[in-house]
Image: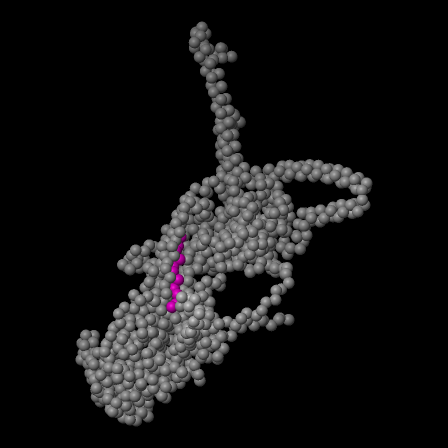
Amino acid sequence: METFLNRYRNLTVLLVALLAQLVLLAYQVRSHGDVRLIRVWAVTGVMPLARVLEGVRSNTFGFFREYFVLLDVRTENERLKKELGTLKMENQFLKTELATADRAQALAAFQSRSPSRTLAARIIGTGTGANSKVVFLDRGSNFGVGKGMAVVTPDGIVGKVIASYPTASQVILITDPSFAAGVISQKNRIHGTLKGQGHSICMIDYIQNEENVAVSEWFYTSGDDRVFPKGLPVGQVKISRQGKMFFKEVLLVPSGLQQGLEEVLIVLEGVHQDIPEVPQTQQPLHLLPAPPRDPASGEAHGVLSGNLSTDADQMLDRYKRIGETQGHTYGVAGPKPPNFNVTPEPPKPPRAEPAKP
Amino acid sequence: MPSKLIPTDYREDAPVKNFLRDDTKFASSKIAFFQYLTVAIFLFLVSGFWQLQVQNPDYYLDRAARNRIRSQPIQAPRGKILDRDGRVIVDSHSSFSLSLARVNLKPEHLKSICEGLDIDYPDLVERLRRFDRTRARYESIIVKDELTAGEIAFVEAHRGQDTFPEMELIHAQRRLYPRGGLAAHVIGYTGEVSEQELNTTEFARFRQGDVIGKAGIERQHNDTLMGVDGQRRVIVDNVGRVRKVIDKKEASSGRSLTLTIDLDLQVVAELAMENRRGAVVAFDPRTGEVLAMVSRPAYDPNKFAGRIRSKDWMEIRNHPENPLLNRSIQAQLAPGSTFKPFIAMAALAAGVADPSVTFHCGGGASFYGRYFRCHSAKGHGSVDLHKGMIHSCDVYFYNLGNRLSIDKIAEWAELAGFGKRTGIDLPGEAEGIVPSTRWKVRNFRQKWYAGETISVAIGQGALTVTPLQMAHAVGGLIMGGVWHKPHLVRDPSHAGEPKRSDLDASHVARVLDGLYGVVNEGGTAARSRIPGIEFCGKTGTAQPVSRELQLSGKLGDKAKDNAWFFGFAPKQDPEIVVVALYEAGEHGPEAAPIVRDVIKAYFDKKARTAPPPVMAAIPMREEVAQGAQ
């Protein structure tokens, strides 16, 4: 047997290699995995090394940074000792400020107050696509990370997980051209779809030209996409103008990517939150009541409103209110015919529900 | 070692010896060369494989995806439909639908898609199964229309190749109709051209998938309202996402159409007909412009704006009251007493209704061996033309009819426009029936009996009219014999030349006096008087079936008498005629308040839109006048 194998060694090796490939292919098909095994192994194999290298890099840079900072501090302290004692206090204040602004602390603070269950992760690599904006995180399926999970920072949303490996995961950033998410404006609660464009500015699509979106207005996640929980900040509007066809051209600066990306949170279980109200920045302006409406021009003309109604609908509402105002039932004989030139009473607001105990 | 193997006889044979030694070396070196070459090739392939599959998979995937050019049509918005004052009745709006590309469809995705978009999962599976049986694999299926902003966000967020690549967003121009079926029968609705329609000459020039007008004005003026679609060529990736627009030809929208409809009157007429079955037509007798046209029950044209759901279609089609029927132009019913003014005109012209002629009404009268009842069981006593009109005395008009022949009545009815289409610019108008001896022979091969004329004289029997025909006929009569063609588009070319007939002015005046008395002299519509307005009219109560069938109760509500009323104002130089048909209204006066409200709305609007009185000319001071010179 041994002689036989030695004699046909090359053929045997080829057959064993083919058999192994067949077995692996069969395993991949059986396991329904949509990620190639070679990729899983490669990522699993490379990630420990990448993590070590990243650790070495960050520690080395950290060491030198600390060294020079300490050197600076020592020099500064020596100088300060020679100079005014008040400057010592200022230096201490600045140090405290730096410590407060520490990203990790902010992340932890956000994590603790967010109702969603999140997992902190570090970015350990970036993708190489021409336009793609993809990063790798150091947490994967071993930590419960799954495909389609949202990735955020305290400043705003960052992206979503598109592939999860045992020890790492791949995240598509919101600036990627194939990224989309449901968003809602803070002021007028207008729904739209956030889309990446391959650069640092995102666009918001499907907002009707008739809608009002102001520059600097904040957008939040709407929860419509079933990826991001409602109420997370997305960014501020940079440009808002009329579009050529039906939809506004709204460009937005994503807030989650402005401070650079090192640590992020993966949303393992999202909880929807309310959209925060617009803060009152100014004293309310005193306005006179509106002048009485001319009955002849009571009906609106022309522009299609955002709630999709025609002038005919508005006319119907107006004449219904005229009838209600005079207690007139249309088409039924009454003591006197209605006067259609009266100003109808404004529509009654819906009655508030009684508070439940 | 090899030398031992070489036979002695050949030891001195150098060429052979060398050949044998060189061959072995040659073979081993060749094998080694090929082994190294194989390893090198393999390493090259592995490195390529590594680069493709591990190092840069997204980059190459991205590049591979950018190689498809697709031509996308840009649907042109249809023109707006406006009322006579330029107010929008029908508009268009941008809309999105979700389709599933069945080529890429993975059944395990369906549940999540249904969950994300609130679609009934078993229903979708069933629809897909049916679709699979009849359609080619490459055809996509539309699973939801009118997506909300949130649903669009869901589709956009998940239609990447990582999640549900089978989802496709389709942008369309959707018609926006008034809510609640307001003016539904006038406007009509749009829809995709069907295969049957493509085989007709009217729609042969359209292509599969084109959206056309299917009913009402949308159909009648489809060419005006329909725009010209544009097109853009785009590069799309493998999931259909547009990567780049190569070129674009913009769509040009359809032209707007201004109707003669006055929304103020239309809305009042709609409100007056709420929860009723019937029709209202308001008509300007001076021009033929239709100011309002209502048919109830109505349907919601917005349901047709996309693809009507089969459930909605079945509901509309199987509705017992047939909401698709435009009763204004398609309901052919006996007019009842509203026909009496035309009998009066015929009788005056024939000299059988002289003012001095009176008939006694004791609650009924016998003609040709049959007793015909009056609507007033106790009778009206001695009745002349004026009284007969005011109180709508049946016995008086039985006698007039008896003195006139059926052919004389038919002649006058046809003169007024009954028994033929008015020619309004709407599809599907009905003709109605004006019975005559010739009509009976032609349709039943029977002779006309004089007793049948008695019923026709009070607007019963075989006589049927549509509400629009009644409005048109009354309009011509009160204008002294000038019948303008009813039309809905505010364009003089649609009006055409009016039909004229020299009616005796004194006869017209006598009929108008009677119609004035109906409302203002304690007649059958006295409760619908409008102070300050010379409102005239005539009530009518028409039996839809025989008295025996009515009493049997088999037909329920449908057997009840129909209430008719036509009114116009002012008495001199009338400006508006309104006809109301209230099916199962039982008594003619029940329809009068409907007309009253519309007429009141007309004059109230006229008062508020009247231009301010012109100021008296102020005499110019002499020096100013000189300076001006």
Q: Residue at x 62, y 71 (%)?
A: A355
Q: Nearer the viewer, residue A153 or A344?
A: A344
The quarter holding residue B387 reads bottom left
Name the side, left or right, on which A259 lies relative to B628.
right
Name the side, left or right, on which A224 lies relative to A52.
left
Q: Residue at x 48, y 57 (%)?
A: A209
Q: Which residues are magenta?
A: B74-84
Q: Is residue B198 visible?
A: yes
Q: Nearer the viewer, residue B618 or B452?
A: B618
Looking at the image, how many numbered discs can be counted on the residues? 0
The spot of residue A291 in percent (x, y) is 53, 71
Q: Residue at x 79, y 40 (%)?
A: A79
The spot of residue A262 in percent (x, y) is 63, 44
Q: Nearer the viewer, residue B157 or B519?
A: B519
The spot of residue B162 in percent (x, y) is 51, 47
State how the image is colored.
Answer: one colour
Q: Nearer the viewer, residue A125 or A199?
A: A199
Q: Is residue B470 above or below residue A147?
A: below
Q: Is residue A162 visible?
A: no
Q: Is residue A220 above or below residue B27?
A: below
Q: Residue at x 70, y 38 (%)?
A: A65
- Per the picture, the main secondary structure of the magenta-coloured stretch is loop
Queried whether the magenta region covers residue B418, the answer comes back as: no
The quarter holding residue A64 reads top right
